[in-house]
Amino acid sequence: MGFKIAVAGATGNVGREMLSILSERGFPADEVVALASSRSIGKEVSFGDKTLKVKNLETYDFSDTDICLMSAGGSISKKWAPKIGAQGCVVIDNSSAWRYEADVPLIVPEVNPDAIEGFRKRNIIANPNCSTAQLVVALKPLHDAAKIKRLVVSTYQSVSGAGKDGMDELFNQTRAVFVADPIENHKFTKRIAFNVIPHIDSFMEDGYTKEEWKVLAETKKMLDPKIKVTCTAVRVPVFVGHGEAVNLEFENEITADQARDILREAPGCQVIDKHEDGGYITPVECAGEDATYISRIREDATVENGLALWVVSDNLRKGAALNTIQIAELLLERNLIKPHSA
């Protein structure tokens, strides 16, 4: 018997991507239900060659549903995830609501699959921040080989990380520049068209933003609490795909050639690293792809045992929807849940 899957937040960018990836990967679901807020009831979303009518999250009965893939925002998740979990349905949540709870596993299947066993306490599993997900896929095999001491990362994050409103704002502002219309900011604090903004999420007391803190906290939780992490998160005028410039300091010696060989064999990683014009990956090439791409691998002579590299991935896929579905696949692979209908 197949599973019954609900997708909460099905009308958003990530929710639609979840439905697409469920179909692409042939997830063993007998039934898939699209859920959203009451204002979206009756809207239609695509699932493979089918069309699903959106149902109301607030009145839906989860008692016969096996997994809820949730991408409806942190406040919705805080309210509904415990109620859904209490009905015996496992919630895999894409918001930041549960990532930092000690008894909720934060999972990237290529990085810390064994931690998934902890989901039984709350029936909730957290998906990491988009910029952290691709980062730790690249870091895990290098950490296993030479033990990372310190991580410095600067992100170049696309506007789709801010949802459809962010994508619309980049489009509208770009058009306004060309036709000499007034440029209006609604989603972002400053103009995003032909500009970069060193500010994502709210500011914290220490001067870092919440987005930067997420990279720090999530990397430590999934990879190693002893790693020292600092981050600068920047929004760039790209529709899809996050880039990251990464500097690493290791406890043990590791060369750029060794790192390349390790990453070529690592799950979820694709190395494109030719020392020539265009011998690297940019966000345009990674859009629609599942892999985390690593380029510009080189030794950093400013520290002992240092490396620098460039990491790119589709933030709507590995950074969100794909990783969520890979977590669901991991539950099935390890026989951690059975269909209610069985």
Image (cartoon, helix red, strand yellow):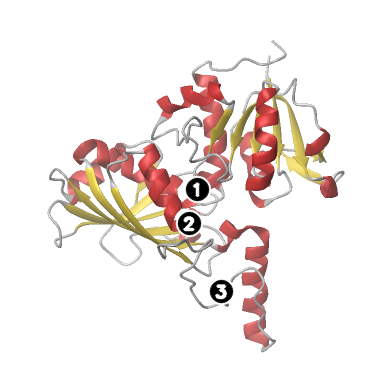
Q: Residue at x 53, y 70 (%)?
A: 237
Q: Which residue is drawn at 58% across and 26% down?
A: 122
Label 2, label 3: how far apart the Cα atoms are: 18 Å
Q: Are marks 2 and 1 in contact (CB under 8 Å)?
A: yes
Q: Which residue lies furthest to the bottom in this view?
A: 180
Q: Mark 3 points at which residue?
A: 192
Q: Are marks 2 and 3 in contact (CB under 8 Å)?
A: no
Q: Is residue 306 above or below residue 52?
A: below
Label 2, label 1: how far apart the Cα atoms are: 8 Å
Q: Note whether residue 66 is visible.
A: no
The image quadrant that residue 84 belongs to is top right
Binning the other alpha carbons within 10 Å of mark 3 as few (below 14), some (14 to 19) or many (20 upward) gives many
Q: Which amino acid does label 2 sit on?
A: Glu
Camera-side mark, 2 or 3: 2
Q: Mark 2 points at which residue?
A: 211
Would residue 51 be found to the left or right of residue 4 on screen?
A: right
On-image quarter of the N terminus: top right
